[in-house]
Amino acid sequence: MADINNINALSTADLLKQKSESGTVQKSGGDFAQQLKSAIDGVNNEQVKGEKAMSDIATGQVKDLHQAALAIDKAELSMKLMLEVRNKALNAYKEITRTQM
């Protein structure tokens, strides 16, 4: 199968050739819906950790301020990434619906 680092260099013909040589298509890591759910669950976990860190700071229960700040930043970045992926998916969907058949 194609290496993830050079997947952009492969053409569709190369991918079809690899498929015909192997005879089967290998699934890696489950279907798209499972991977999407896993990614959303990961973002949710980061948000929960960030909220806990913020409440610990507010109540004075934080033991390590640096780790709390990192948890908050990680939650923020994961949410921004998820929103950007969502925006790209919506733009791709809109582009597909605009194409004429």
Image (cartoon, helix red, strand yellow):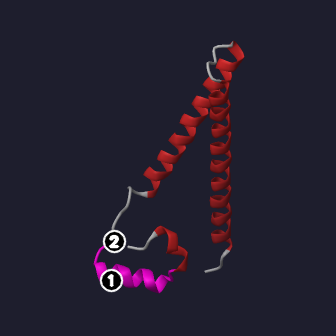
In which quadrant will I find the C terminus?
bottom right
Q: Is residue 84 left or right of residue 1?
A: right
Q: Which residue is drawn at 43% across and 80% down?
A: 15
What quarter of the picture does the N terminus occupy? Answer: bottom left
Cα separation, mark 1 vs mark 2, equals 9 Å
Residue at x 50%, y 80% (from the top left corner): 10
Query: Which residue position holds label 1?
Result: 20
Q: Position of residue 52 (x, y in %)?
A: 61, 24
**Going 51% across and 74% down the picture, which residue do you hit?**
6
Left or right of 93 on screen, residue 45: left
Q: What residue is pinned by disc 2?
A: 25
Residue 85 vertical position relative to residue 7 in the rendered view, above or below: above
| Front residue of 11 and 70 | 70
Judged left or right of residue 65, residue 21 is left
In the image, what residue type sits under mark 1? Ser
Can you tell which quarter of the image residue 72 is in?
top right
What amino acid is at disc 2?
A: Val
The answer to which quarter of the image holds residue 62 is top right
- Dot 1: what SS? helix
Provide residue 83's location: percent of width, then percent of height.
Answer: 67, 49
Query: Within 10 angstroms of label 2, few (less than 14), some, or many (20 or more) residues?
Result: few
Magenta span covers which residues?
A: 10-24
